[in-house]
Amino acid sequence: MKIYHNPRCTKSRQTLAIIETAGITPGIIKYLENTPSKEELLDLLMKLNLKPADILRKGETAYKEIIKGKKFGDEELIQIMIENPKLIERPIVVKGNKAVLGRPPENVEKLF
């Protein structure tokens, strides 16, 4: 199991705590420091069964400045997320060929 984690995010910390309380030590990817590649994002989206627009943080300033009110294709949104990783919803937890968004944090229990 691995978690795409932002230690400054309450939901991300809560999700990590649920995982650790279950006795699991996940791999922790601080995605703001180690931005996922295009291939990694495509793999995450496939495992989440979501589109790029579904994992955008719409409350972020970068969303309002770059994306809001404009039309972008999936490839363009992925590139924008790579260039602005704060736009990627967090946390994302992966186990095998499945992944969940930790919003709410209890979603992670679907992977146990």
Image: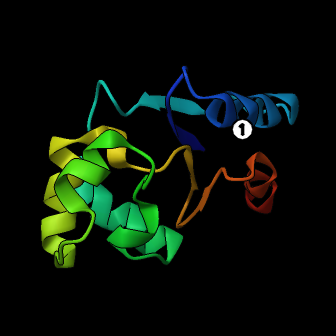
Which quadrant would residue 96 be assigned to in this image?
Answer: bottom right
Residue at horizontal 18 percent and vertical 78 percent from the top:
71
- Residue 38 visible, this orientation: no
**Figure check: 44 above or below 19:** below
Q: Nearer the viewer, residue 73 or 29?
A: 73
**Place of residue 31 in the rendered image (x, y in percent of width and height, measured from the top left):** 37, 34
Residue at horizontal 38 percent and vertical 49 percent from the top:
88
**Place of residue 53 in the rendered image (x, y in percent of width and height, measured from the top left):** 36, 70
- Residue 105 visible, this orientation: yes
Q: Which residue is mark 1?
A: 15
Other residues around mark 1 within 10 Å, as few (<14) / some (14–19) / many (≥20): many
**Place of residue 91 in the rendered image (x, y in percent of width and height, measured from the top left):** 56, 43
Residue at horizontal 18 percent and vertical 54 percent from the top:
66
Q: Quadrant of the N terminus?
A: top right
**Figure check: 24 above or below 87:** above
**Place of residue 65 in the rendered image (x, y in percent of width and height, measured from the top left):** 21, 49
Which quadrant would residue 3 be assigned to in this image?
Answer: top right
48 left or right, relative to 22: left
Disc 1 residue type (three-letter):
Thr
